[in-house]
């Protein structure tokens, strides 16, 4: 094997090694892209869950506000009933006996109403505390949602950058393949020229071997270095 053959083979091996490295980089980039896709899908799921929880919290707040309004209306009604009872107690003196008899009943109802008001007041306080906790939870969920949205945008940017990098590596791989194909073609031409030179040497007379060999090698060198 001549030095030029060895040199050509070395170039081919070098190109094959470059191609192998580019393939490895492309596989690695594809793995990174897949990881980013999974992270984006997970963030989308978390975002949807946060939206659902936020909607549920708003519905709960609306329900509690309705209950509070009902409790306040009930309290006003009870106050009105108490006022009516007191007015009845101050009614006609002619009904004093009946009022006295019914006083105990009204007093019992009044105590029951007071207890009910106190119970509803405690319930109202608890609902207000629960409402405060829910509002705090909504604020926390909103903050987490904003953080998740920021992370999602960052991952989208990384995904776009990885896609561009992958396209660049793919272009380099195609260029390497074209160079490899060109080198194979040149190597085949070189082998054909060497074979032709051998056959031509056999046909030439013994007195011109050196001249024929030089002519063939000159033509071969011209083909190797031709752009």
Image (spheres, helix red, strand yellow):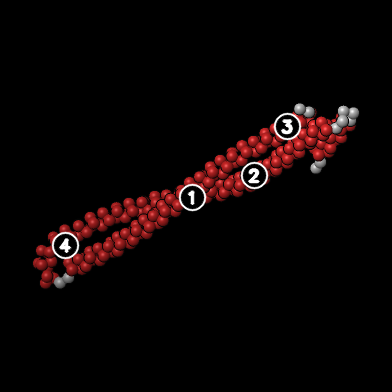
Pointer 1 residue: 44
Local secondary structure at mark 3:
helix
Point out the tag, 2 or 4, that comes first from the N-terminus: 4
Is 164 located above or below residue 102 in the figure?
A: above
The residue singled out by tag 3 in the image is 9
- Residue located 66% across and 42% down the image: 173
Find residue 199 and report its image quarter. Answer: top right
| The disc label shown at residue 170, or none | 2
- Secondary-structure class at tag 4: helix
The answer to which of marks 1 and 2 sits earlier in the sequence is 1
The answer to whether the residue labelled 1 contacts the one labelled 2, judged by CB atoms less than 8 Å apart, is no
Q: Which mark is residue 58?
A: none
Please state the horizontal and vertical placement of residue 91, each as a whole percent of the image.
17, 70
- State the separation of the CA atoms marked 3 and 4: 114 Å
User: Does residue 81 appear left or right of residue 33 in this picture?
Assistant: left
Label 4, label 1: how far apart the Cα atoms are: 62 Å
Q: Quick one: SS at disc 2? A: helix
- Label 4: which residue? 106
The foreground one among 15 and 70 is 15
* 10 Å crowding of disc 4: few (<14), some (14-19), many (20+): some
In terms of depth relative to the viewer, which is nearer, 65 or 114?
65
Q: Report, in whole angstroms, how far the alpha carbon at label 2 lies from the one at label 3.
A: 25 Å
């Amino acid at each position: 094997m001549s030095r030029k053959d060895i040199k050509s083979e070395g170039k081919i091996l070098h190109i094959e090694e470059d191609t192998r490295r580019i393939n490895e980089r492309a596989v690695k980039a594809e793995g990174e892209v897949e990881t980013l896709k999974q992270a984006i899908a997970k963030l989308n799921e978390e975002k949807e869950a946060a939206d659902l929880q936020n909607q549920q919290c708003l519905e709960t707040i609306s329900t509690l506000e309705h209950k509070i309004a009902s409790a306040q209306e009930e309290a006003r009604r009870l106050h009105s009933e108490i006022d009516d009872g007191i007015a009845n107690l101050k009614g006609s003196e002619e009904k004093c006996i009946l009022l006295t008899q019914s006083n105990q009943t009204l007093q019992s109802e009044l105590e029951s109403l007071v207890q009910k008001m106190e119970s509803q007041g405690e319930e109202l306080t608890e609902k207000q505390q629960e409402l405060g906790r829910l509002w705090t939870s909504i604020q926390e969920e909103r903050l987490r949602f904003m953080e998740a949205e920021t992370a999602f945008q960052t991952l989208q940017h990384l995904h776009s950058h990885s896609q561009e990098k992958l396209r660049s590596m793919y272009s380099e791989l195609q260029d390497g393949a074209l160079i490899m194909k060109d080198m194979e073609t040149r190597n085949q031409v070189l082998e054909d020229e060497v074979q032709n030179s051998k056959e031509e040497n056999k046909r030439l007379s013994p007195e011109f071997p050196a001249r024929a060999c030089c002519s063939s090698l000159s033509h071969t060198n011209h083909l190797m270095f031709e752009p």
